[in-house]
Amino acid sequence: MSAAAKPRPPAFPVNWTSRLAWIGLALYTVYATSILELTWARFLTGLDNGAKFLSRMFPPNLAADKLELIAAGTFESIQIAVLATFFGVILSMPLGLAAARNLSPGWLSWTARGLIAVFRSFHPVIVAILFVKAVGFGALAGILALIVSTMGFVSKLFAEVVEEMSPKPVEAIRATGASFLNLLAMAVLPQVTARFVGLTVYQLDSNLRNSTMVGIVGGGGIGAPLFTAYQRFDYDVVLTILLIIIGLILIAEFVSGRIRRIFL
């Protein structure tokens, strides 16, 4: 071995930062488990209670009066989801464009991002409780809560889509001296429309699910009959509602998948 030869570095150097992070996570997991009373005995007891609960849910209640009430709540949930998605997406477009740092000045972009962060800070159920106190029980509170949720999700992702688009068409249109609206129509929208449609369809799926939760706190829809049935120990009615919700989500997933294949 010559004096000028240098020792080869290890093929797989040890990443002590990563190892210490994993060790810290493992220690914190053990600590959190100990203070939250997560015991095997409680888990087994929960399995037994869950089995008894499920046995009281079968068979589902298919009485005509119950199905009529459930159908009305389901139809209202669909209306809540569609209206919230429609208005939320319309409001998300200018907010997302304002948050895009490649189109907006710094002060406007950071202001819009701060507003989006506020919308994303609270779960739809919490927002629904606030609107129930403001406008009363019913579908309006649920629609307003889901509009806020939609704006927090769609506007953030829409801004990221706009920031990831190719800058060349934007620069070419700007070089012609076109107005900002022409810039959006000719350079921005053709690049982001397909992704925006995908976001809209996904948000509609999400709003269908969330419309059930906001109904539990008074925001209208199928959540209200579900909560009432649970309070009355009508677990067979609870199962009927859950099966209808699952069917509704499966249908929405099929339709959204077809729409994505058309536009994406």
Image (cartoon, rainbow, N blue to C red):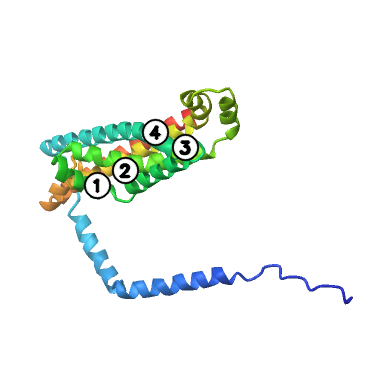
Residue at horizontal 45%, vertical 33%? 260
Q: Earlier in the sequence, mark 1 or mark 2?
A: 1
Mark toward the viewer: 4 or 2: 4
Q: Is mark 2 on a helix, strand or loop?
A: helix
Question: Which residue corresponds to the image point at 58% horizontal and 22% vertical from the top-left?
Answer: 176
Query: Which residue is under mark 2?
Result: 149
Kind of residue at disc 3: Ser
Q: In which quarter of the image is the N terminus?
A: bottom right
State the residue in front, 94 or 232.
94
Nearest to viewer (mark 2 / mark 3): 3
Query: Which is closer to the viewer, label 3 or label 1?
Result: 3
Observer able to see residue 98? yes
Q: Which dot marks residue 104?
A: 3
* C-alpha span from label 2 to label 3: 23 Å
User: Which residue position holds label 1?
Assistant: 127
The image quadrant that residue 7 belongs to is: bottom right
> Of label 4 and label 2, which has the lower sequence position?
4
- Check whether the beta carbons of the residues at disc 1 and disc 2 lie within 8 A of each other: yes
- Image depth: mark 4 or mark 1 in front: 4
Give whichever of discs 2 and 3 has the lower sequence position: 3
Residue at 15 percent across and 40 percent down: it is 135
- How far separated are the C-alphas under marks 3 and 1? 29 Å
